[in-house]
Each structure stands twice: as C-alpha cells, then as structure tokens.
Image (tube, helix red, strand yellow):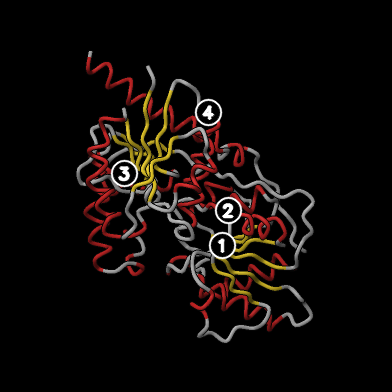
C-alpha cells in the first residue's frame, strides 16, 4: 500500500519569508532524495509558484492552486485542506498553524512562539491571532514537530504538549575555491528582535574607529534597500535586501565572517550556513545558538546592543577572522536527507496507527 502525503506549501512566496523558504526547500530536497514507491507526495502551491517547485522536485507531484490574494490564501489554508484529506493519509502543515477545518490526520511544524517573548514586534491583531490559533493548532494536531529543543520548551510552556524535535534541514554547500571578499555578511529581516538597527550602528562605529581598514559590511534580507534610505550610511555599509539563492550562497562563500545580531531565534539557519561555509560567526549568546552550534561563534554579550556588537566585531577583526573548531555532529544533524527521514518516520507512524484503528 502506498502512503500518501500532502504538504501545504502555500506559505512559500518567492522573495518573502526567506528563512521559511529555505527551510521548506531543504526539507523537500531531503524528501525527494528518499522518494521511492512506498510513499507518494503532493505539494500544494500558490498560483505562479509551481514552475519553481517542479524544476527543483521533479519526482514530487505539484498542484498549483489558482489563487494568489492574501484573503484567498487564508481561505485555502483554513478550509480547502479539509476537503483534500480524502486524497491523503496525512497532511503536513510546515508553517506553524493548523487550518480551522483541520484534516483528521495532520501534522504541524512550529518554528517559534516569538509572540510570547517579543510582543512589541507584533500588532494587536497579530498577537490576538497567534495567541488563539497557535494554541488551538498545537492542541488539535495529530503530531507537533518543533525545530529545536528551545522551541519544544516554549510549546510545552504554552500548551503543556510535548513535541518531536527535528532541527531544520540546511541545504547550503560552500562554493569550491571561492576567492574571499573583504566584507562581513549580515542576513536579517526587519523584525525588531532581529536587532538590525543595533547592528548597523555598530558597523558605522567600527568604520569610524578603524579608518585604516577597508573592511565593509553587507546586509541582506527579505526587504528592499529603500527601507534604509532615511539613514546616513557610510559607503562601506551596503544594503542589498533580497538576493537570489545563488547570490546568497556566493555571499556566504566569499565573506570574511557572518554577523547574526538577533536576540531571539527559533533555530537560526544562518548559524549553520556560516559553519558549513567555514566562516567565523558573530551572534548573540542566547540558548538556541548554544544548542545549534555550541561554542563555535564569537558571542555578543548582553544586552546585545550596538556597543556589545561593536566589541564583538573588534574581537573577530583582531583575530584576523580565525575560524573556531566545531563538532561535526552539528552539520550531520541538519543534512536534508537525515531530517527528511525523521519527518517520514513521524508521518508514517500516524499512518500505521490509523490502519490499526481501522482494523
């Protein structure tokens, strides 16, 4: 009997939510490597996204839903998947929320419960939605996957429910023989907890205090460079905004170091991306960083402001960007195929338990 899996990919939108997009493509890459006749996967994607999925995962079925507006995305997610359940043994929802009309066998992936710890980053409506629907989703899902031990603790604190911990798969590979550029890369969104304004201030201060250096700083993320037009930035600070996957890989492979100034993360994919590309990492000393990459980073101390980031930049500069040793298990743990096997085990266990219940 073929095990049929449906995956809701409607949260994928090219050029947005870059962390989620990377996670989803890495997971699907792992599943496509494992694909055999024992299971069948159908991806549900938004209008205009199908070609990208088909080109990357030719052995997975892709169904393009003929809607694109925010309202229709809400409608698709919350109502249509209930009617798709007859076509699948289990449906995976990889973006935090279960539909209002949830399928009988459904699994959600919780990436963080950030609204509990950084409420200032959300509007009143966003907070209300997340408080109500996050708890409802976690309680009613057939199984819950959390992307780190830190998130698993948050889930249990919030709902008293245990979850399966599977670290995010990371698909990036360093480019061979890439000439180094004299710059520090900062991948970040504009959310307040990402701390990008403090990072910019620290970089400005570094440039002023090190006039003999020609080191410059490159900021990328799911935003437009015009978002920073109001700032009087020095020429050695480049705001690129959204870049393609290939350009992002080139930047990671050629930079001198990676700066991740956020003081909250559910997982922190740039931590692993810097490690895989053998780049020294500067990040805040928070529990998730210790969980994902141990003592590999050059840590930013509390309270994680511009002064602390500036001091960390000086430290790494004085070491001539020395790469610290790391435990190979950190990389092995996030290989897409390894993560995909863990997902399949959970999905298949639900399928088998439903068969026992029917017999």
Residue at 48% x, 77% y: name it. 227
Q: Which residue is mark 1?
A: 260
Residue 61 in picture, x, y percent from top left: 43, 35
Q: Which residue is mark 4?
A: 34
Closer to the chain start, of discs 2 and 3, is: 3
Instruction: For mark 3, give the secondary structure.
Output: helix
From this viewpoint, which residue is outermost toward the top? 359
Residue 211 in picture, x, y percent from top left: 75, 83
Closer to the chain start, of discs 4 and 2, is: 4
Closer to the chain start, of discs 3 and 4, is: 4
Q: Which residue is mark 2?
A: 271
Residue at 49% x, 57% y: name it. 18
Q: CA distance from mark 1 to mark 2?
A: 8 Å
Quadrant of the rendered structure where residue 107 is?
top left
| Quadrant including the N terminus | top left
Closer to the chain start, of discs 1 and 3, is: 3
């Amino acid at each position: 009997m073929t095990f049929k899996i449906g995956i809701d990919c409607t949260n994928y939108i090219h050029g947005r939510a870059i962390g989620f997009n990377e996670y989803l493509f890495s997971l699907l890459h792992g599943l496509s490597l494992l694909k055999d006749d024992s299971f069948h996967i159908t991806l549900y994607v938004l209008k205009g996204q199908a070609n990208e999925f088909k080109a990357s995962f030719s052995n997975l079925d892709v169904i393009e839903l003929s809607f694109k507006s925010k309202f229709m995305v809400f409608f698709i997610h919350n109502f249509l998947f209930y009617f798709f359940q007859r076509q699948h043994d289990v449906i995976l929802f990889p973006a935090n929320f279960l539909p209002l009309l949830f399928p009988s066998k459904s699994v959600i992936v919780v990436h963080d419960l950030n609204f509990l710890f950084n409420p200032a980053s959300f509007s009143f409506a966003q907070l209300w939605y997340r408080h109500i629907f996050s708890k409802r989703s976690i309680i009613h899902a057939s199984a819950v996957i959390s992307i780190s031990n830190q998130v698993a603790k948050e889930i249990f604190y919030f709902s008293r429910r245990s979850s399966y911990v599977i670290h995010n798969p990371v698909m990036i590979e360093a480019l061979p023989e890439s000439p180094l550029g004299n710059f520090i890369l900062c991948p970040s969104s504009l959310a307040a907890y990402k701390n990008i304004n403090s990072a910019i201030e620290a970089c400005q201060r570094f440039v002023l205090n090190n006039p003999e250096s020609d080191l410059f700083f490159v900021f990328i993320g799911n935003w437009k460079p015009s978002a920073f037009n109001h700032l009087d930035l020095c020429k050695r600070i480049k705001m690129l905004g959204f870049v393609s996957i290939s350009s992002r890989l080139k930047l990671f492979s050629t930079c001198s170091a990676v700066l991740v100034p956020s003081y909250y993360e559910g997982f922190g994919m740039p931590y692993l991306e810097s490690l895989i590309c053998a780049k020294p990492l500067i990040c805040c000393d928070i529990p998730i960083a210790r969980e994902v990459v141990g003592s590999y980073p050059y840590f930013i101390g509390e309270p994680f402001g511009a002064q602390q980031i500036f001091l960390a930049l000086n430290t790494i500069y004085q070491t001539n960007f020395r790469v610290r040793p790391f435990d190979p298990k950190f990389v092995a743990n996030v290989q897409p195929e390894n993560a995909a096997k863990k997902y399949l085990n959970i999905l298949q266990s639900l399928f088998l338990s439903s068969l026992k219940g029917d017999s």
